[in-house]
Image: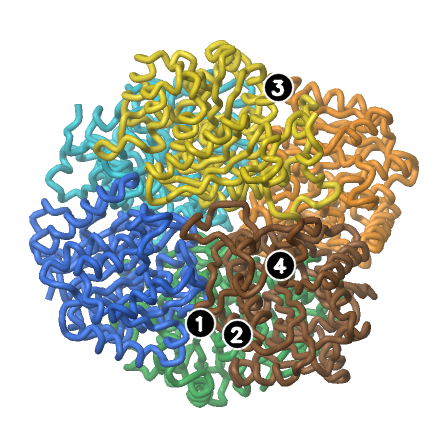
Chain colours: A yellow, B orange, C cyan, D green, E brown, F blue
């Protein structure tokens, strides 16, 4: 059981529109806080989108996700889990990026997450564009390559863009495999779709043993069967979960930079998380929420609902 | 057959964007009108949201629903019913609330609906937040407790909010059961989901015999099977139908105050109404449409499409 | 293989938000261009909505569709087709309409498409309201009546509006049958739904042998089975494909003038096109995209995704 | 003093968001109503925009203006006038147009206003695009040409568009002068600005004695001086007031089809109406409010504030 | 000079879109924090709108204002003041209201502000609707009635609404005068405009010596002269400043519930605050910012710019 | 007189919503086009915002500006100039940036503009964030430092951000002075306002002789007097004009990343350009239009109206 210090205030007591918005109304701690050492799960924002090759905006994601997250209550409806009582959870604030310098920003992120790893805090990240996952993995994969369940409409396995630029939101997992942060044979990418430049990314996947589940297969086989394969692919060793909001159909999640039509609905968006139970998740992220393209906040509300599911999955082992 | 006085003008004659917008282009009557006594189904707006604990706005619902309703035509596509010919329908205007006084507003609403009941007019209500249903039920349940089919993502069965406040949009059906307006054993709540405060509401339901169909069960069993159970639960005695627009997934109905992701789509939103045929419906409502959170009007158009289905269901016995 | 002159620039080289937006980044040619004679598939805009009886806006469709179309890449994800390499495709610009004169506009459109037919260019049109299809068919059906696969929520088979007006977006296919441009026995209309004025249009369909697949049947039988019937209905003779964006549920495609709730989702919206393979398609259109009712551009992005599918279908025979 | 039958309900009694929205909460009468003969000022909607050469939408103007108009209260703040007590005012509904037939629509409008003129009712019109003014003037100028105060950023004095089309929203006053409905020497056009096609319209004005006040002169001389000249130009004979919402800077009134930046602010938008006092106004209109381009409703609220000022001016003689 | 503990982080170090959003990036303290006793100016949110008679939404004001406030930097451009160095400023969080109980909410607010007064903290409040000012004044006016500079388009001096409801956002200053919280002879209301119900509020003002400056007088005399009179009216004794965002023209501040066109622009909105220098301000508020009616956030950014000016004015004596 | 090849089509012939949108409907040429050598004024887009320290989006500016620019007609209303007849103007397309590499993008921009300078084409640029001006100046200032008239709310004279990053949209003119591209004594910055980090930028200006006109001085002295000083400051030697859209009040131009309230209105936004007549302008830009923050397009339409004024100013010497 968690310490009451870490329990969010209820909407029965303080209306959900009130108060300074932290993630899920958790206490906001920085590393110099006396209770920092007691945190088990840290919710972290990475307001950064310099790796974006198309429409920008995820730098504004963490703030809108915090705002929407005050709508989240304490208990999971389907399985009854109460995650804030199951572990000490806290909002650890944002990693301050340098919007005009990609290497500097990556170094800052890796340093921040290294500190968490050393403190024994498992991170649940709100991005940020998908390049965010790379510096996070550099901090988390210190004990060997990780497996990964990856929800997305894109593989993010490209070699480079614009004549040789190696670090963009379309390349993080190519780099992560090259750097030995991921074990490609324990990586599964689910929901891939959309018009393609060419087959370069899929050739890389095939050559390295990464499993790709295209959307047609996802719909044909169904959530339960695909996720059973996902668990089998990743196995019992430590793994990471990376959830790009553009996995979901853009009608349900318009606030993102590179939408691809014809994706899962919001119910399936939650269901896939519920099927992660049993994995050894060392960290997870929800990335590519871009508020300027959905000022209604609907994408962010779906995003924090997914984050709540990921949090429960991290605690369900 | 209805009197031509009560027939809406066709969009073939007057374009649908033209004219003062009444519900479904029906004549607008007040109780002092000579034809009031001939009305069989009264469409009524209750522009009131003082019971809202979260995001306000349903006070603007009736106006936007009237605007959208001029898109509705005369005939049901699937079953061929022409409801405006089947009964004398009219727009009876809005109940004037007192936005700064909840008890006063509830008294005004009950008085208005008592007048309808006494005139033999069955009401189809456009809310308003869900507290609206309570003063309406106080007027309609004069001859004994009613059954109810309730579409919603929330049970609205809580005891109180904010340290003891008994009348909010999260408590109407707890009050209605306590006041003997509803027979809990003839009440079914369909679509329940979303993160939970705790289990207090479901404990109340279990203790009183209210049937809750969570969204997971709804999707697993399908519309036809769930609605068959709904009809069996309610039986042939008089019943009420209460439809909270947040039953529908918020992507299809963003204009509402307390959305919960992962709900039914717009086709299912209509289908459940078509499966009400045969019930003895003494009144129905569509509540929690909040225009400020969907200025596109899409929620309202779905809302009036549901109202048209409810109207047909009220006439299909 | 197509000529490299006709290949779009890749988003790997020029970011997708850059450049003057032509359809799918294809070269923009007018009929006086030296390469005009080499074009095989012409993408054409018809920015015209004077036939609209309800909410206007499709005159702005082609521009927003061009803008969104720069998100389209070169290769189909599911079948690997690379249409811009399979044929010489080009953006042939817009037909200039006369917004205040319907007959004049129809004459201009027919003249433009006659020129294309004479040059051996198959057109893929971005409307425009649905009246657009009539003057296009007048140009294309010179060698006898065509079959047609028609995706829509409305039949567009009405006789007239407003006391005898014969040319509106609700009448084009009635006129086309009367004028011998369509062979009604080879016409199938899929997705029909929404409240109805009366049964006049369906009576006309029944009397002439037009096959209507209501949305209830569409969902009950599924895409594969319905489309198998569609191919059988149309047969191997030349046909036209007309895709009204309001075929899709308005949550997925809000930017249209006469939405009807309860329609297909975005995945189904694409799937139906993939099942057109093998037909002899002499032309296709995507109509009724109305940007003022969806400034987010989501409808347009779905629209161009559909146009990409139609393009592949036109090349898949 | 007016009859209490014609007094709007106060927002102190019925909240302003409640009730079926008629213009300024006035009673809605049609010509067959027993009190029709007692009406002195008739507020009329003309939901029509078929004359629009650019961005459409004013067909939706009357409805949004009615909605916004329930914010209007009973008394003028600056001069204390209470217009609804000064005369019997009523909402006379909309003229039903034929969106697909310009001559038919013009005939319907002229017929409607002829009926008003014959009943001694002075009209205050909510358009509709600016072509609306022409068929209205045809009904009102039965006793000889009228003077006119015209607020606009365009002269609307062009000969024709698109190769000879004579009836568009850019030509009504050219036609009105040609038809003898306006006395050009008693016409003043205020606020003219924006890039120009050429000088054809201004040459026509100069040749016929129409006074044009460009925006530069308007700002340099100020409201009081310009309006003094306007009153002198029009004189004491009967006149019409035509107010195109695009007279106002588009930041204050974005909901219009052909905006021109650099115009008057909202205070000046009202002030010019207050300076009409003393004119013999036989009718007035507020046109070109296009809701699809301002879903916030700000333009409509400014529009009805202008209509309230025009109403007071009509009663201030 | 203030303690560096209370200095906001600079946008040069942490990008302005990063971090948990507190008011102006100040430290967030609750009353149990060890540094609470050192606070001199407390920024407080009151997310409450139950007194709203028209369009709701100000309950969401504090959150959006906090979000926008991270755009505020450290130094005043015109006078060079650095307020966060001039005094210890802090974000003291929100007063938790009871949205469904007006008396309970007022008691909570008065209790919160009483605690601040007792701790010697001067409050700068972000509302909330204008009823907020009444319970705040109840806490602050313990040593005798206060003077007040009041910027608004409405007097908020009405007796009651809806048949006798005494506590709404249209009545706070009538109550405050009656309760002896304000000295009416030291109260000035600036910017009053808009259509009026009647003259009841102005009669009350006249009878009690409250000075009303209508907008026409404001524009005719100019900011400097009007504000000189304001300072003379209020004098050197303690006073309160209440700023309703609807003082500003709704084009500049659309996010409010009861807009009135024809008001000051954004430059004048700031200038009036700069002319408060020298007054003995015991507290100030900025109320009626309603985010649902301006999701762009422009109103909130203007609002926090005004709050920054009010903060400087509170420190400029 | 210009060649008719370079004349835009008129809105009298082709409706303004029709056609592939190039800047002001000019012909779109690339450097390999046979008429490239005849171009005198080149309109160029730079869709790039990697230097943005705050809210991103100007990478989408050129496309939205092109779209809005089809509303521009051929003749200046106030002075009668017809710029497209006065010189051969063309849309030269966009410079393709590398969104993830600032130095690479700057090199691409400088190379593109060097080509224009060598061809004798004067550029009128649509940005892009304000860092765009630096690589443009590197190409244009080959013959010695330029003077500059700079409209902005910020000086953009900072040394660095985020611990030493030298190239952001807040530093271009510091760099330009350091690199000898600008003669600081011939530079004037007009409209400066907003809260300040500190005085570092103004100290740099003072030390180098750059003239800053704060907004308070701008309003106090008026457009004519300030611009007279601007012309005197810059003198008759070659100069550049840089116009940041955030010079204008954000109510008139919300679509920008770092708005500052209290700025000029849209009329003043145009007037300042008209007062540039007589300067020897070697190039001009309009930057920081950020479409995601104003999807209405109002900012872009104001932006292209400013570009039209700048074009006339470039031709008015």
Q: CA distance from mark 3 to mark 2?
A: 57 Å
**Residue E43, numbered circle:** 4
Respond whether the residues carrying marks 3 and 4 are from the same subunit. Answer: no
**Label 2–label 4 contact, CB within 8 A:** no
The residue tagged 2 is E274
**For this view, does E63 lie left or right of residue B134?**
left
Q: Where is residue E209 shown, x and y percent of the image? A: 73, 84
Q: Quadrant of residue B125?
A: top right
Q: Is residue A214 above or below residue A61?
A: above
Between disc 3 and disc 1, the foreground one is 1
Q: Where is residue E111 shown, x and y percent of the image? A: 77, 58
The residue tagged 1 is E78
**Label 4–label 1 contact, CB within 8 A:** no
Q: Chain of mark 2?
A: E
**Label 3–label 1 contact, CB within 8 A:** no
Q: Chain of mark 4?
A: E
Q: Please tell me how crowded label 4 is: few (under 14), some (14-19), or many (20+) other residues with Cα within 10 Å.
A: many
Q: Quadrant of residue C217?
A: top right
The image shows a total of numbered marks equal to 4
Q: Dot 3: what SS?
A: loop
Q: Dot 4: what SS?
A: strand
At x 38%, y 68%, the residue is F266
Q: CA distance from mark 2 to mark 4?
A: 19 Å
Q: Please tell me how crowded label 2 is: few (under 14), some (14-19), or many (20+) other residues with Cα within 10 Å.
A: some
The residue tagged 3 is A316
Residue C103, visible in the rendered structure: no
Q: Earlier in the sequence, mark 2 or mark 4?
A: 4
Respond whether the residues carrying marks 4 and 1 are from the same subunit. Answer: yes
At x 88%, y 39%, the residue is B141
């Amino acid at each position: 059981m968690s310490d009451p210090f870490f329990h969010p205030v209820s909407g029965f007591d303080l209306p959900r529109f009130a108060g300074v918005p932290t993630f899920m109304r958790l206490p906001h701690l920085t590393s110099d806080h006396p209770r920092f050492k007691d945190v088990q799960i840290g919710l972290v924002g990475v307001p950064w989108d310099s790796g974006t090759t198309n429409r920008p905006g995820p730098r504004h994601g963490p703030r809108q996700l915090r705002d929407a997250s005050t709508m989240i209550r304490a208990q999971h409806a389907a399985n009854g889990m109460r995650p804030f009582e199951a572990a000490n959870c806290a909002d650890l604030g944002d990693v301050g990026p340098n919007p005009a310098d990609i290497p500097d920003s990556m170094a800052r992120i890796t340093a921040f997450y290294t500190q968490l790893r050393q403190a024994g805090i498992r991170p649940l990240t709100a991005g940020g564009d998908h390049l965010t996952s790379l510096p996070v993995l550099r901090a988390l994969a210190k004990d060997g390559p990780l497996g990964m369940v990856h929800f997305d409409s894109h593989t993010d396995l490209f070699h480079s863009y614009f004549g040789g630029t190696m670090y963009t939101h379309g390349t993080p997992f190519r780099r992560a495999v090259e750097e030995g942060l991921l074990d490609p044979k324990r990586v599964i990418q689910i929901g891939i779709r959309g018009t393609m430049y060419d087959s370069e990314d899929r050739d890389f996947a095939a050559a390295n043993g990464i499993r790709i589940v295209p959307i047609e297969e996802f719909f044909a086989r169904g959530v339960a069967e695909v996720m059973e394969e996902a668990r089998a692919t990743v196995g019992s060793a430590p793994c990471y979960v990376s959830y790009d909001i553009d996995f979901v159909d853009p009608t349900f999640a318009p606030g993102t930079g590179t939408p691809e039509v014809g994706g899962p609905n919001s119910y399936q968006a939650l269901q896939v998380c519920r099927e992660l139970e049993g994995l050894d998740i060392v960290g997870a992220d929800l990335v590519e929420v871009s508020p300027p393209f959905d000022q209604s906040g609907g994408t962010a509300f779906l995003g924090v609902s997914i984050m709540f599911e990921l949090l429960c999955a991290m605690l369900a082992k």
